[in-house]
Every structure is written in C-alpha cells, then in structure tokens.
Image: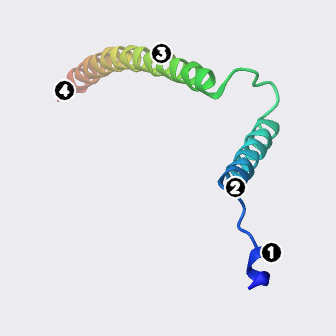
Amino acid sequence: MSNQGSIQKPSKVSRAYDRLQEAIDRLEKAVAERPAGTGASPAVDDRTQLVSLREEVNQLRQENASLKRVNNQVSGRLDSAIARLQSAIGN
C-alpha cells in the first residue's frame, strides 16, 4: 500500500498550467508561421480583405454594366448594317 502513496496524479493547478503552456506554444507557433509583412491582427487583415473584395466587386459590376451598354450599341449597329446590306442586294 505504500506503493500507491508514491504514485500521485498531477494536481489540477499543474494540469491547468500544462494546458496553458501548450496553448501559448501553439499561439507562438502560429505567430511565427504567419506570412511576412502582416503586422496587423488577423481580424484587421480579414476586414481589410473584405473591404478590398467589395470594392473589386463594385468595380466589376460597373465594368459589366459598361460592357452591356457597348454590346447593345454594337448589336444595334450590326442589325442596321445587316438591314442595309440586305436592302442593297435586294432581299
């Protein structure tokens, strides 16, 4: 029975300390593995990227609308040219 007394479970404080140390090690590893030049926090980087993506989407929508207008103009001109050619050849 004296053998059981020498084998003790780690205390709650000791286990909590070990878990805390492991968490700190994971955080330090994550910070070390971040790409160079990203000094801002991930939340700031995410917000910046989201704003950038929204701006890009808006720009692409404007470009799409512009291209639709050009497409409609070209389509109208082609229809007109085709009608003149058909008239010239007697169709």
Residue 87: where, in percent of width, then height?
Answer: 20, 21
**Crowding at mark 1 (Cα within 10 Å: few <14, some 14-19, many 20+):** few
- Provide the residue designation for mark 3: 59
Residue 56: where, in percent of width, then height?
Answer: 51, 20
Q: Is residue 36 above or below residue 74?
A: below
Q: Is residue 87 above or below residue 32?
A: above
Q: Is residue 29 above or below residue 91?
A: below
Q: Seen in the image, is 87 located left or right of residue 52?
A: left
Q: Residue furthest left?
A: 91
- Provide the residue designation for mark 4: 90
Viewer-side label of 3, 4: 3
What residue do we see at 73% from left, 53% from top? 14
**Crowding at mark 4 (Cα within 10 Å: few <14, some 14-19, many 20+):** few
Q: Quadrant location of the C terminus?
A: top left
- Provide the residue designation for mark 2: 15
**Crowding at mark 2 (Cα within 10 Å: few <14, some 14-19, many 20+):** few
